[in-house]
Image (tube, rainbow, N blue to C red):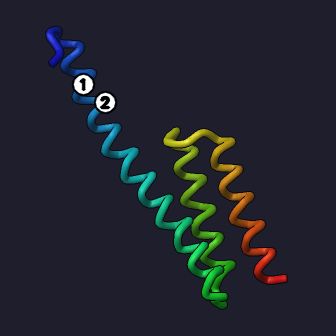
Amino acid sequence: MANHKSAKKRAIQNEKKRIRNMAVKTRMKNAVKAVRSAEAEKAENMGDVLNKAKSVIDVAAKKGVIHNNTAARKISRLTKLINGAQA
C-alpha cells in the first residue's frame, strides 16, 4: 500500500477511474453485442441500434476510455457489417 499521503490519494483516484472506465467499457461492449445480434436476426431496427452503438463508442473515446482510432475502427466495422446485411 502507499506510504505517502499523495500516493494514497492517487490510489483512491485511480480506483474511482477504474470503476468508471469499467462501466463505460461494459456499456460499449453491450452496444456492440446488440448490433451484432440485430444483424444476425436480420432485425428491422438495425440502423437505430447501430446509431445508438456509434454514440456509446464515441462517448467512450471522448472520455479517454478507448483510443480515438479504436473507436473509429469499431464504428467502421459495425457499419460495414450492417451495410453488408442490408444489401
- In which quadrant will I find the C terminus? bottom right
Q: Nearer the viewer, residue 50 or 1?
A: 1
For the residues bearing labels 2 and 1, Cβ distance under 8 angstroms: yes
Question: In the image, is residue 40 above or below residue 10?
Answer: below
Query: What is the x, y in percent for residue 13?
Result: 28, 29
Q: Residue at x 77, y 66 (%)?
A: 80
Residue behind mark 2: 14
**Which residue is situated farthest in the top direction here?**
4
Query: What is the x, y in percent for residue 56?
Result: 54, 59
The Cα atoms of the two marked residues, 2 and 1, are separated by: 5 Å
Q: Residue at x 34, y 39 (%)?
A: 18
Residue 49 disc label: none
Residue behind mark 1: 11
Element at label 2: helix
Q: Is residue 10 left or right of residue 48?
A: left
Q: Nearer the viewer, residue 46 or 33?
A: 33
Label 2 environment density (alpha carbons within 10 Å; few <14, some 14–19, many ≥20): few
